[in-house]
Structure formats: C-alpha cells, structure tokens
Image: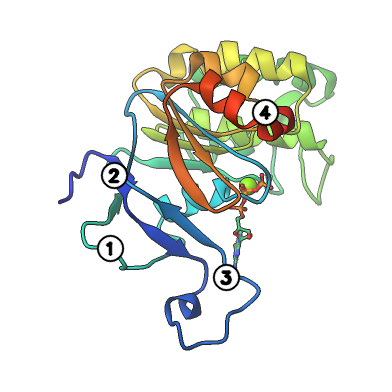
Amino acid sequence: TEDTNVIGFNNAVFAWSKDAEDGTQTPSARSFRLRVDGKLMFQRNALNLIIGPTGSGKTSVLMALLGEMHFMPTSIDAWYNLPREGGVAYAAQESWVQNETIRENILFGAPYDEERYNKVVHQCALARDLELFTAGDKTEVGEKGLTLSGGQKARVTLARAIYSSAEIILLDDVLAALDVHTSKWIVKECLQGDLVRGRTILLVTHNVALASPIADYIVSVGLDGIAREVQDLSVFLAKNKKLAREL
Ligand code: DGT
Ligand code: MG
C-alpha cells in the first residue's frame, strides 16, 4: 500500500551501509538501524517535531525520508515516502555557506523578491546581524570574506530553506546553535509566520519546551533506534525523566 501524498513509514527498517543488510557480513561498528514499528505519518501543512537523545537517530529519520539510507525489506507491508513534486528543502545539521554574499547564500539561485526576502531576514532573526555588517547583505562570506558565527550560519541555512518555494522543509536542529531569545523569536516569527503557511515542516530539535506547544505531531527516537509517535508529550516526558532532563 502506498499513498503518494503521505510522508511517513510503516514497519520500516533502515541501515547506513548496504553490508548491514547481509547477515553473513562481519558486523561493522556502523551497525545502527533505524526502526519504525507501526505507522508514522507526518502531517502535511503542519509542524512535525522529531525529538530524542543525541545519537538516537533523529538525523537518520530525515535521511531515510530523503532516500539516503538503505531500506531493508524485512517486513511485508513496509513503505516510506517523500513527495517531491512541490519541492523539498533540507537544512542540514551542519549548517553551511558558500563563498558568495549573504544575500546569494539565502536566495540560493532563486529570483530576488524584495518583500519575501525582507520577511525571511526578519523572521530568521538576521536583520540586526546584517545591519552590523558595513556591506549589509552584500557582505561576502566564506573563504573570500567574513567568517560567520555558528549561530549566524544556522540562521542563513534556515533562511535559505524558508526563502525557497519548497513545500516540504526538513530542518535538522536549526535551533541548536542559538540562544534562548533567538530561538523563541524563530519559533514565533518564523515557524508560525506566514511564509510557512501551507508548507510541511519536519523539525529535529532538542528544544522540546519551546517547540512542542506549536507542534501538530511529535515523533521520538529512542536510543534503541526505534522511532515512535508521541501521543501525549507530558505522559511521555514523565515516563522518560532522563530524556526530559536532556531535552
Ligand atoms: P544528534 O544529532 O547528535 O542529536 O544525533 P541524532 O539523533 O541525529 O543521531 P544520528 O541519526 O545522526 O545517528 C544515529 C546513528 O547513525 C549513529 O550511530 C551514527 C549513525 N550515523 C549517522 N550519520 C551517519 C552517516 O552519514 N553514515 C553512517 N555510516 N552512519 C551514520
Ligand atoms: Mg542529528
């Protein structure tokens, strides 16, 4: 069974290396497997959270959706899907910039629309940073120019995804490098802003307290590599006290 409009998994198992599929191979150090027992269906036109301790497999969930992991055909009715017609934007956990201006880094080849661009800069909390640069958003970054801070790079990476017209936006821990004030700004102005309306967001985050109140669907990945839907976050956190402290 496959619904092309669904983003999700049903009883799927994924591995990083093809070798891991073959039981006769010596088990490598990289024997991690991502498992989904039952159904995970991320909601369209909604904010989906992926939470879990470090190393559990949150990035792997995004990679499995992107087709970057090996799908292991172990169960009968397993399927996964990432509809691509409307475009997919992916902000990697390791944020990056190219050797060009900040503006070009955000536009990423898309045409310049002043109103949209200014909104993105505002919502992604970049306005003040740009004001502080003499050349503003014409400032060259990367090898040729200024080196951006981790938090600035993270916001440029976020801005690139929001500026794009992609209908599906995968954001891997974009709040991680940011202080509380900036994270709050982005949750309020960007993740609840007009530019994400009608789009599907999958946000990996450790900042559950901040993001969960506006989430429509929450998935947790455990240290066993099993991803599950969290139906009641307060019950889940009460049962997972150690994780609740880490998050
Ligand atoms: P984080 O970002 O530190 O909070 O951790 P997660 O939850 O994003 O964990 P993830 O998905 O990066 O790692 C889960 C396991 O998968 C871990 O044992 C490392 C392994 N892994 C992650 N990325 C790769 C990769 O690109 N290649 C291989 N072979 N293994 C990977
Ligand atoms: Mg990760």
- Kind of element beneath mark 2: loop
**Whole-percent x and y of residue 7?**
32, 41
Residue at numbered disc 1:
75
Cα distance, mark 3 to mark 1? 19 Å
Amino acid type, label 2: Pro
Residue 31 - label: 3
Residue 244 - label: 4
Q: Earlier in the sequence, mark 2 or mark 4?
A: 2
| Residue at the image point whose x is 22% and y is 62% from the top | 76
Say if disc 2 is inside 8 Å of ligand 1. Answer: no
Image side of residue 133 versus residue 42, left or right:
right
Cα distance, mark 3 to mark 2? 28 Å
Rendered view: 228 above or below 182: below
Say if disc 3 is inside 8 Å of ligand 1. Answer: no
**Whole-percent x and y of residue 239?**
58, 29
Label 2 or label 4, whichever lies nearer to me, is 4
Q: Earlier in the sequence, mark 3 or mark 2?
A: 3
The crowd level at tag 3 (other Cα within 10 Å; few <14, some 14-19, many 20+) is few
Q: Quadrant of residue 105?
A: top right
Cα distance, mark 1 to mark 4? 32 Å
- Kind of element beneath mark 4: helix
Q: Earlier in the sequence, mark 4 or mark 3?
A: 3
Residue 83 - label: 2
Residue extending farthest to the front is 239
Q: Earlier in the sequence, mark 3 or mark 1?
A: 3
Label 4 or label 3, whichever lies nearer to me, is 4
Residue extending farthest to the left is 1
